[in-house]
Amino acid sequence: MRRLLTVLAAAALAGTAYAQEWRNAPEYDVLLTSYDIVPGTIRLKAGQPVRLRFVNNSNQKHDFSARAFFRASKLRGRDARLVAGGRIELPPLATETIVLVPRAGRYRVSSSNVLHRMLGMTGKIVVE
């Protein structure tokens, strides 16, 4: 019983530590415009929590598809639903923020819309 209480206490403290890290994470804007992702290269630090604020400033819906990146990252619990299928979709003129801890690697990003991708809606994420 004592061992169970110790494990539960450690889990509660770890959860609190992660909550603190999420709140203090630096924020980066990712702008989704008509046929562009800005910045074209997103540079992050491995193992460091980060807030990614996606901004769609166009009058049409856009998405940011990065399946390998989202699969490799540890997402804040409530943000996992926002990147279902490895992409985040934003309606026109919308903003959405997700918080995650990225894993080292180089990842491709793009729109899942073929026409948007052909017109330049691509980029990469570099996590070192």
Image (spheres, helix red, strand yellow):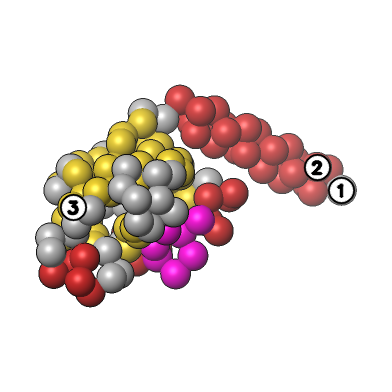
**Quick check: 40 left or right of 63?**
left
Going by the numbered disc 1, the residue's amino acid type is: Met
* Residue at left offset 32%, top offset 63%: 65
Image position, residue 5 (x, y; %): 80, 42
Q: Which quarter of the figure has residue 49?
A: top left
Disc 1: which residue:
1
The disc placed on residue 5 is 2
The disc placed on residue 36 is 3
Q: Which quarter of the figure has residue 124?
A: bottom left
The answer to whether 126 is drawn above or below residue 65 in the figure is above
The answer to whether 98 is drawn above or below residue 19 in the figure is below
Q: Which quarter of the figure has residue 86?
A: bottom left
* Residue at left offset 36%, top offset 31%: 27
Q: Confirm whether residue 106 shows in the render.
A: no
Image position, residue 25 (x, y; %): 41, 30
Mark 3 or 2, closer to the camera: 3
Q: CA distance from mark 3 to mark 1?
A: 56 Å
Q: Nearer the viewer, residue 62 or 7?
A: 62
Give the residue at the far right of this rendering: 1
Q: Secondary structure at mark 1?
A: loop
Q: CA distance from mark 2 to mark 1?
A: 6 Å
Confirm or deny contact between disc 2 and disc 1 (CB under 8 A): yes
Which corner quadrant holds the C terminus?
top left
Q: Secondary structure at mark 2?
A: helix
Q: Which residues are magenta?
A: 82-90
Image position, residue 24 (x, y; %): 45, 25
The disc placed on residue 85 is none
Is residue 83 part of the magenta span, yes or no? yes
* Residue at left offset 19%, top offset 67%: 117
Give the residue at the far top of this rendering: 24
Going by the numbered disc 3, the residue's amino acid type is: Asp
